[in-house]
Amino acid sequence: MRILVVGSGGREHALVWKIAQSKLADKVFCAPGNGGIAQAAECVDIKTGNIPELLDFAKKEKIDLTVVGPEAPLALGIVDEFKNHKLSIFGPNKSASRLESSKVFAKELMVKYKVPTAGFDIFENAAEARKYIEEKGAPCVIKADGLAQGKGVIVAKTKEEAIDAVNLIMEKRVFSEAGNRVIIEECLEGEEASILVLTDSKEVIALASSQDHKRVFDNDQGANTGGMGAYSPAPIVTRELFKDIMERIIYRTIDGLSREGVDYQGVLYAGIMLTKQGPKTLEFNVRFGDPETEAILPRLKSDFLEVMLATAEGKLNKISKLGGLAWDNRVCVCVVCASKGYPGEYEKGKEIFGLDEAAGMKDIVVFHAGTKRENNKILTNGGRVLGVTGMGKSIKETIDQAYKGVEKIHFDGMHYRRDIGQKAIAL
Ligand code: AMP
Ligand code: GLY
């Protein structure tokens, strides 16, 4: 089979890496890919938002399955477009993608179908939002309705921070039309976990649980990022909690969508806060998590391409009948190495040293997130540069292994968290 993966981050490197291991895969392309992906797939210079060119490429190259990494092309309707041309594609259509592209849509769906989530109000007017904050006080969470590259959520400790967030989103329009509406949400407390499932809207198969580390600095300090590291499984998600999450969050959401006439096909990611009152949904993503994918996929023993194909074709029950997915019992820890300045303005073009040495280590995989190859050198080309995944028997030894891998690598201004996975040890 000929496969096209759309995207250029660490998640896409992990997808390409896993798909290339399938007995069904003859040739893997990635658009646009990055410096590391180029070692496992043929990179094609087409941007993820250029749907007409991606479509032309898929037709010309007789692609059997396209796998979409990021949310933006899904929200633009890449799946609808490919399906109109009878091309097989993994991911939800434009209507189903609203679960991520409109937080208001997701919240209203959750209320209608009794999916546990934080209490909230929706505002279309900045003055009303400010008045509400003055009355209700802080802490609270301000969320831009639309896609904002992971920056549209502000957890405000004080009224002033909350009002600043409303002004930024609704008056200064930093996320343009994504800020037409805001949600002001009750601030939840607890541990977070990511639950990802594959579904063709009839059948649901969960992937292994994981936990992300969203803040830039150790001990969850500093600004929110796309994710500074992850581990899988997340031991905090006990069997009982998992069952509860599946029943009250995942099934109700997929079923609710179906009742609204929306069939969901692809991967559904629920960001969950484990509160004292039980699991509550923080957000939905309509794609694989990054860096969760880099910690989950190395543990998957099943043929991933076969499973994705079954999902895209609406035949996921075939996989269930064969006994579902097989997982390696070992754990994975992924540490993200970021550029100086990330998650703010960051540097690019720094040479990366030690990659071969790290990648040559036992039980280490180095996934490239923001890199490019130039004159036989690998240079930094993004905020999150690499995801170094270690695999091992216990969480403690795996953390040590992952950091041994990280220590081999160096580039100017590189920073990373030193406490990835510590929460799992504490349990
Ligand atoms: P989201 O993009 O909605 O996942 O939000 C990013 C991060 O903001 C989450 O991972 C949480 O750490 C935090 N967050 C979002 N919503 C809430 C909430 N209602 N209460 C507390 N923290 C939240
Ligand atoms: N790691 C968080 C996300 O993928 O949205």
Image: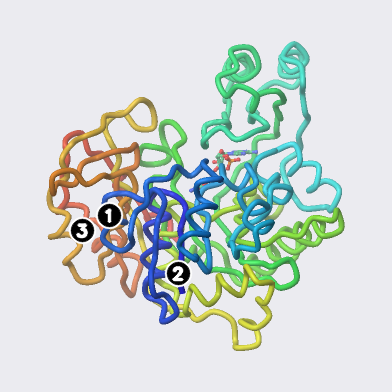
375 vs 91, left or right, is left
Alpha-carbon distance for marks 1 and 3?
16 Å
Residue 272 horizontal/vertical position (percent): 62, 52
Q: Residues within 10 Å of mark 3 (few under 14, many from 20)?
A: many
Viewer-proximal residue among 175 and 165: 175
Residue at 53% over, 59% down: 59
Q: Can you tell which of label 2 and label 3 is closer to the viewer?
A: 2
Check disc 3 and report its element: helix, strand or loop: helix
Residue 86 horizontal/vertical position (percent): 65, 63
Write down the residue under mark 2. Answer: 2
Residues at discs 1 and 3 in contact (Cβ within 8 Å): no
Q: Against 63, is 127 above or below?
A: above
Residues at discs 2 and 3 in contact (Cβ within 8 Å): no
Residue 147: quarter of image = top right
320 vs 104, left or right, is left
Residue 427 horizontal/vertical position (percent): 46, 62
The residue under label 3 is which amino acid type? Gly
